Image (cartoon, helix red, strand yellow):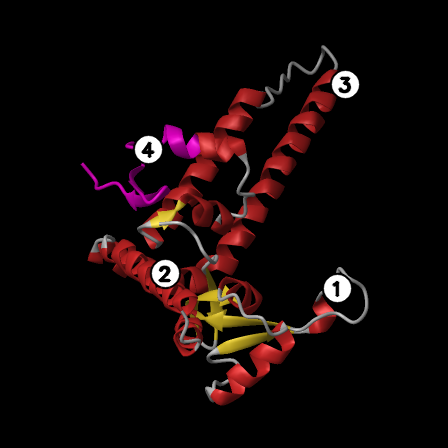
Amino acid sequence: MNQIIEVIPREIGTSEVNSVDARELHTALGVKKKFADWISPKLKDTMLDEGVDYLVVNPQEGKNPKGGRPTTNYILTLDTAKHIAMMSRTAKGKEVRAYFIEVERQSTERKGDIPAPVLDVLGQLTTAMQSVGEGMQVMGRSLNTLSDNMEKMQSRVEALEGKATTTTNIHIMPPTRSQIEAKRTSIRLQMLKNLVEINPGINQSQLMGLAGYRRDDKSIRKLLKEMQGVLWEVLPYLNQYLYYPMEAE
């Protein structure tokens, strides 16, 4: 299916819906009137509600590339765009409306392919993330602070050991860097495991965010990959990796 107009999910009103740019719709329909002279009567005649059927883009948020005052733009819900296309009563309007219906059908089919348990988990995940998100981010920051303190402790012990005299017969063995790194990894794994147990079905980016790590942290992504099948099971779905806690053997 050739793309006539870009359809993008946006939050309009209280939910996320498919939407289109009103200027792109104006162009696709081949309307001869200027955009400003066309859009306002359309919205008024159809008795559409701002914030429910469409959004007004504040002109102060953009610039007019041709100079002068910034232009006002509108974001329409897909249902609104279909209605306006039908009202045009032209072959082009019929084609655009049929395109919107096909886009909506394909979107519905993709949602229908998702297993019901996965949809339930994703719905529960949102609620769980809100309740534990802030605490997990604090835990992640605390982990980084703990790691820094352990390295500082090693440096201080090494300095004390260097000052010790041969008559004391005391030999302090500081932790090695490999031991520090192993402890750090153990703490990270425990925190990640706890997050997966609290939020079964969480995806990789959400898991890293809750743990307080940047989503482009390659070391953590490598750790997650190495622990697949050891601490958690991973279900690849729609280019995402959904994590589920491993069952005790």
| Left or right for 129, reference 112 | right
Q: Nearer the viewer, mark 4 or mark 2?
A: 2
Q: Amino acid at mark 3?
A: Lys
Q: Is residue 171 above or below residue 217?
A: above
Please identify the residue farthest to the top as the structure is shown: 166
86 vs 178, nearest the viewer: 86
Quadrant containing the C terminus in the rendered view:
top left
Q: Which residues are magenta?
A: 223-249
Pointer 3 residue:
163
- Counting from the top left corner in percent of width and height, residue 145 is at 62, 43
Q: CA distance from mark 3 to mark 4?
A: 46 Å
Is label 3 or label 2 in front? Answer: 2
Residue highlighted by disc 1: 63
SS label for mark 1? loop
User: Closer to the N terminus: mark 1 or mark 4?
Assistant: 1
Residue 225 in magenta?
yes
Q: Nearer the viewer, residue 77 or 179?
A: 77
- Residue 187 part of the magenta-drawn span: no
> Looking at the rendered structure, which numbered label has been put on residue 99?
2
Residue at the image point whose x is 75% and y is 64% from the top: 64
